[in-house]
């Protein structure tokens, strides 16, 4: 899978830009706040349908402009894909795949697989469980559309259940009506939990290999999936979750939200049996986060037969020279886009970025 060209108009600080890429390594060089990361963001948006930043679509449109356009041409193993996206301040965004409009983001996800990493991805290791769930959800969804739709379904059901818990109804009235939401919630939860467990089992050997390679093999990495349903993933999952929902109903009613479910899942991460989140150094956390991202590459290749696009935003500033060289050797099998603030000895195509222009 290779990106051939990117064309953007009125995206972030860019007016018009058309770029043709190398099939291996592409490096965006420039000082801070010139627009390097914005190019990665435009690529990511064409793959996932949203930014890797917490922002609204209209914030991607250049200041004082009404519309923004992104076009990505991609060569895949069996077919070529053109992605065209139009953003507007007042209208719903428009996404076309090979000239045909799509109605749901789920139709876009998985067409072009992508892995993104930046120093901010340390939050994957050291911050809230939400970050680790997001890591699982984005990766699994790119290779499993059913998972994406089951996740969306679960979130809608959960919102309705919580709405009922917060309503003015009495506890007894809630008990009479909540069962319909519980049954639907349990079905989706079973599928989501099963796929998340499989995902952790699949990426673990790849993460261990990547971590060993980058760190020099001094520590043993392990991952443990923690289901927020606190029940075993077996043939009795749905039955046991149903019992837990009933057992926790009074507490849920008191708090006004559902206290158990896959929306509370987490991943425990250990180095030599020591929890990285609480006791790992920043260097250890950084290496683990990078290893998890590199594991995504191998896992996606194992599933699809193609490596995804790799986006590395200012990663070299956080790694010593030895780790930089190890990383470049490790990712040599996939098309990689790198941002950095200074020229360094990198094979590939260099793009100098100055104030939203490629010079």
Image (cartoon, grey):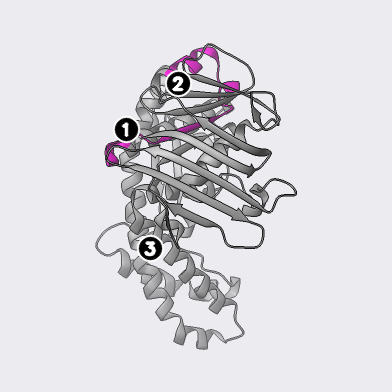
Q: Nearer the viewer, residue 221 or 122?
A: 122
Say which label, 2 or 3, has the lower sequence index: 3
Name the residue that disc number 3 marks: 189
Q: Residue at x 54, y 84 (%)?
A: 171
Q: Secondary structure at mark 2?
A: helix
Which-is-in-front pick, marks 2 and 3? Answer: 2
Label 2, on which residue?
A: 327
Q: Secondary structure at mark 1?
A: helix
| Label 1 Cα neighbours within 10 Å, binned few <14 / some 14-19 / many ≥20 | some
User: Where is residue 307 drawn, in percent x and y?
Assistant: 35, 34
Query: Mark 2 and 3 residues: CB-CB less than 8 Å, in contact?
Result: no
Gap in Å between the C-alphas at discs 3 and 1?
A: 26 Å
Q: Is residue 124 visible?
A: no
In-front residue for pair 242/145: 145
Give the extent of the magenta segment.
Answer: 301-328
Give coordinates of residue 123: x percent, y percent.
57, 39
Label 3 SS: helix
In this view of the protein, can residue 302 be seen by the observer? Answer: yes
Number of the label disc, if any, that sits on residue 63 = none
Which mark's residue is nearer the viewer, 2 or 1?
2
| Residue ID at (48%, 65%) | 155
Between residue 316 and residue 89, name the one nearer to us: 89
Q: Label 1 belongs to which residue?
A: 205
Give the image location of residue 349, x and y in percent. 50, 20
Circles 2, 1 touching at the beta carbon (< 8 Å):
no
User: In this rendering, would 62 be left or right of 192?
Assistant: right
Relative to residue 162, is residue 263 depicted above or below? above
* 331 or 6: nearer the viewer: 6
Q: Residue at x 69, y 45 (%)?
A: 62
Q: CA distance from mark 2 to mark 1?
A: 17 Å
């Amino acid at each position: 899978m290779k990106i051939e060209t990117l064309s953007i108009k009125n995206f972030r600080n860019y007016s018009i830009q058309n770029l043709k890429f190398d099939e291996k390594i592409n490096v965006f060089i420039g000082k801070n706040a010139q627009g390097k990361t914005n190019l990665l963001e435009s690529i990511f948006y064409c793959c996932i349908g949203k930014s890797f930043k917490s922002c609204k679509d209209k914030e991607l449109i250049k200041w004082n402009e009404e519309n923004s356009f992104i076009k990505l041409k991609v060569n895949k193993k069996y077919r070529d894909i053109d992605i065209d996206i139009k953003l507007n301040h007042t209208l719903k965004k428009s996404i076309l795949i090979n000239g045909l409009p799509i109605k749901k983001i789920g139709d876009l996800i998985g067409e072009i697989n992508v892995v993104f990493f930046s120093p901010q991805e340390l939050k994957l290791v050291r911050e809230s469980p939400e970050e680790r769930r997001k890591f699982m959800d984005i990766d699994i969804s790119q290779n499993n559309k059913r998972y994406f739709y089951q996740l969306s379904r679960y979130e809608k059901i959960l919102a309705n259940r919580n709405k009922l818990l917060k309503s003015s109804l009495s506890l007894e009235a809630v008990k009479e009506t909540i069962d319909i939401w519980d049954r639907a919630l349990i079905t989706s939860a079973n599928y989501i939990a099963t796929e998340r467990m499989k995902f952790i089992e699949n990426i673990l050997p790849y993460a261990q290999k990547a971590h060993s390679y980058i760190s020099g093999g001094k520590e043993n990495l392990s991952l443990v999936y923690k289901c927020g349903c606190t029940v075993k993933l077996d043939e009795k999952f749905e039955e046991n979750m149903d019992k837990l929902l009933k057992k926790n109903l009074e507490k849920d009613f008191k708090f006004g939200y559902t206290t158990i479910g896959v929306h509370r899942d987490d991943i425990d991460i250990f180095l030599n049996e020591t929890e990285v989140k609480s006791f790992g150094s920043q260097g250890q956390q950084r290496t683990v986060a990078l290893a998890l991202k590199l594991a995504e590459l191998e896992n996606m290749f194992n599933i699809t037969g193609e490596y995804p696009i790799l986006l590395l935003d200012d990663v070299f500033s956080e790694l010593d020279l030895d780790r930089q060289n190890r990383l470049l050797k490790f990712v040599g099998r996939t098309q990689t886009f790198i941002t950095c603030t200074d020229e360094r000895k990198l094979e590939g195509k260099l793009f100098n970025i100055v104030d939203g222009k490629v010079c």
